[in-house]
Image (cartoon, rainbow, N blue to C red):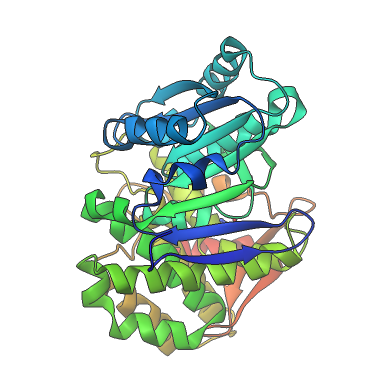
Amino acid sequence: MTPSARTVAVSGDTPYTIHIGPGLLGQGELLARHVRGRHVLLLSDSSVAPLYLAGVTSALLAARPDLLIGELVLPAGEASKTLAHFGDAITALAALGATRDACVMALGGGVAGDLAGFAAACWMRGVDCVQLPTSLLAMVDSSVGGKTAVDIPEGKNLVGAFHPPRAVIADTAALRTLPPRELRAGLAEVIKYGAIRDPLFFQWLQAEHAALLAGDDTALAQAIARSCEHKAEIVARDPLEKGERALLNLGHTFGHAIETEQGYGAPGNDNLNHGEAVAVGMVLAARLSAQLGMSGDADTNQLRELLLRYELPVAIPAGLQPEALLARMRLDKKNVAGRLRLVLWRGIGRAEVVADVDEADVLRVLAAG
Ligand code: GLY
């Protein structure tokens, strides 16, 4: 292992390790260590596959020449996270003759990770999944914790399963080829950890924005490790989101509503991507908290200013109607008995789940943009 690699342990009923460091996708022994049987399905997307798929395949085969490796490459973008492509993954596993000791490897961002994880959760009622995240967003959030899903037109991630990975291997060298917009989207999820539970990390992010935006290796590795430590601690205690894990959804109820309402886009279109929608969602959650007297406007402004410093959007895109967004929010998975449950905060580092939020209050925030 390279000297600068580090690990974060996820404990609990299904413990696993998150490996973080440059060059890990070329380490065949590390990749193959998590493959129990002979069958591997590598699921990737059309942006990531040309860069890394051949290298991962040859590294795996160098370590385990007996492996049978199948490939499935989907069009890049959230629009691929569908039941139809889930079906393609299942067909690929069948074509491979994958047995119960098979391993699905997700090589890419959150879309590849969520889809591969869901296919692994369902094939023969569950086979192993190894996450090989190549985007910052996937490294700090979606690859860790075992949430897997596909989107349907009615809402994001509405069909899925909890299926913890067998390992997460985050090759930070992959971030060097990440488009700047994708890097910023991942930084929104990094900022989320500071906003939820770590004021010191929030301050560090205020100080380090130039280094992080420039893709500085050391600063990014530190941001990823700290984010993964937070996520690991929470999902170890609450893997199925019966309690505190919901806090990780700060900004997500608003954000998912924006993503669903604007339609799931391909890369390069003008729609907000997931991280950008979460950035707007966090500001809306902060404003709602202030409106309910839980926090002050100064807290909202600090969050808004930090997001702006990271060149992230902080307002609802033009053309989205408040009533339509509220209708989307009614299908959020946190809601109970038809009442909105939202993650709000009492200021930086103090997020909490609030049940029975009045729709009129939410509408007021949405209408103000
Ligand atoms: N992305 C939030 C969670 O994994 O719980």
Please say whether residue 367 is visible from this viewpoint: no
Q: Report if residue 328 is visible in the image.
A: yes
Q: Is residue 222 left or right of residue 346?
A: left
In the image, 299 versus 65, the foreground residue is 65
Q: In this view, does 114 lie above or below 187?
A: above
| Relative image position of residue 311 (x, y in whole percent) | 24, 66
Q: Is residue 13 left or right of residue 197?
A: right
Choose between 54 and 2: the one closer to the eye: 2
Residue 369: where, in percent of width, then height? 37, 63
- Furthest-top residue in this view: 95
Q: Residue at x 22, y 55 (%)?
A: 180
Q: Which residue is at 54% across, 86% downward?
A: 295
Q: In this view, does 367 lie above or below 28?
A: below
Residue 285: % across, % down: 51, 69
The image shows residue 344 at horizontal and vertical percentages of: 59, 73
Q: Which of 32 and 194 is in front in this view?
A: 32
Relative to residue 266, is residue 106 drawn left or right? right
Ligand 1 quarter of the rendering: bottom right
Quarter of the image containing the N terminus?
A: bottom left
The total number of labels drawn is 0
| Residue drawn at x 49%, y 26% as measured from the top left | 65
